[in-house]
Image: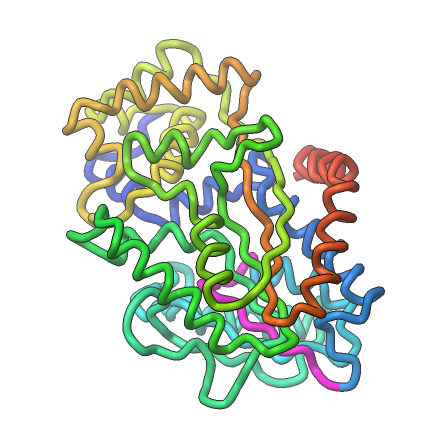
Amino acid sequence: MQLGDRGEFSAQIRDYDTCFVEFLKPSGNGQKILQSILLREAFSLFALQAVVIKQNAPTVILDVSCGPGDYSVTWTSQIARFLPKGIAFYCTDYPEGISRETGETYAMTTAKKMEAAAENGKLRLAQAPVATNADLFFGDDALMPSGKTANIVHWSHSGYHVRDALGAARNDPRAIEAGLHAAVDKIWAVLDEMGLMVSVHETRDNSDGIQSQIAPVSRKYCGKLDDVPERIAARIEQLGGYVAVVNVVSPLKFPGLDDAGWERLKRPAQWDRLNMSAVRALRLLNFIAYDFSDPGKSALETLAEDGRLAPFVNEYKSIVATNGGHIVAKCAFQMISKSQQVAKKLDDIAFQLTEKMRDFSEEMAAEMRRS
């Protein structure tokens, strides 16, 4: 199947949004489904234990690195039933993040999608959503308007981007640490004293015998951070806070490719002649390589120039074959608080969520089949 000229196709592969949309397709990726289930179940327990949720006023939510807003609508819709006075919604993303769909910043796009969701009855907003354009990793940009704090902060899967933001210093350990510390500190500054921060990032933790097969592999080839949760937890401890964690595992399905199909993925000159299954595989590989620092070159193109594309593809081909058609993503669902009183309840909630993980995984699998 011809998909257009090579230049056009290469531009698609370099585009973060295009690869991200491919990655998020629910029929092939259980990650966001399971994450939403966990948020729903966690908020059910928050309501039972009278923690975090405001009973006599709107619950103030800040969505950090909100992106184009679709997932913001998904997860807030899941928890809306537990918020008796509705939501005062704030969102933030970096100023250069522009939605291809709307031509507006990610933050503004998210705010408008939240308004539409409220109009459609998916959730209740107590006020118009507030969008803030802010650099998370550097500078003095505040994540919320002056004087505002959040009862709940949601931060999902953007900690890895600190390397993209660093430019030439992207592999400097001190610069990476400083950037992540800046992000955590900015979130900490707007978190209410009795509030909750939920952070979800891929983890390299394998204490339960399960190893993630995305970041630890990508790190070898492209430097993707595979220890963001550990770095976040260390900084929170320095700030005097508390972390309760639930590790979650989900599949990322790859389309069935024969040996010839996998071989074509190793040859950029053949990319414009790939069939749709191979195109999906290529976009997935480029996204999980997680190097979008050069707008003129995809991560896979960089690997090809360095002579490392073939071993990168071969490693994932082997993993997919061993697993029967998928790779494993393992994430840390971290619940973070400033208050020891809140932290004790979060530890209990983390235990209860872990005990029910089999049920959540079955629900995730059923939802993937329906998608």
Tell me if residue 103 can be seen.
Answer: no
Q: Could you say where residue 242 lies in the image, as x and y percent from the top left?
A: 59, 62
Q: Could you say where residue 291 lies in the image, as x and y percent from the top left?
A: 29, 43
Query: Which picture quadrant has residue 363?
Result: top right
Determine whether, in the image, residue 108 is placed left or right of residue 47: left
Q: Nearer the viewer, residue 350 or 75?
A: 350
Magenta run includes residue 70: yes
Total marks in image: 0
Q: Could you say where residue 163 lies in the image, as x and y percent from the top left?
A: 28, 51
Q: Is residue 335 above or below residue 208?
A: below
| Quarter of the figure that contains the N terminus | top left
Q: Residue at x 25, y 43 (%)?
A: 11
Q: Is residue 267 above or below residue 38?
A: above
Q: Residue at x 26, y 37 (%)?
A: 299
Query: Which picture quadrant has residue 302?
Result: top left
Residue sitting farthest toward the right: 48
Q: Residue at x 20, y 48 (%)?
A: 294
Q: Nearer the viewer, residue 212 or 96?
A: 212
Magenta run includes residue 179: no
Determine whether, in the image, residue 296 is placed left or right of residue 13: left
Q: Residue at x 64, y 46 (%)?
A: 246
Q: Could you say where residue 200 lies in the image, as x and y percent from the top left?
A: 54, 52
Q: Nearer the viewer, residue 371 or 57?
A: 57
Determine whether, in the image, residue 171 is placed left or right of residue 106: left
Residue stretch rendered in magenta on the structure: 57-71
Query: Which picture quadrant has residue 318?
Result: top left
| Quarter of the figure that contains the C terminus | top right
Q: Is residue 206 above or below residue 89?
A: above
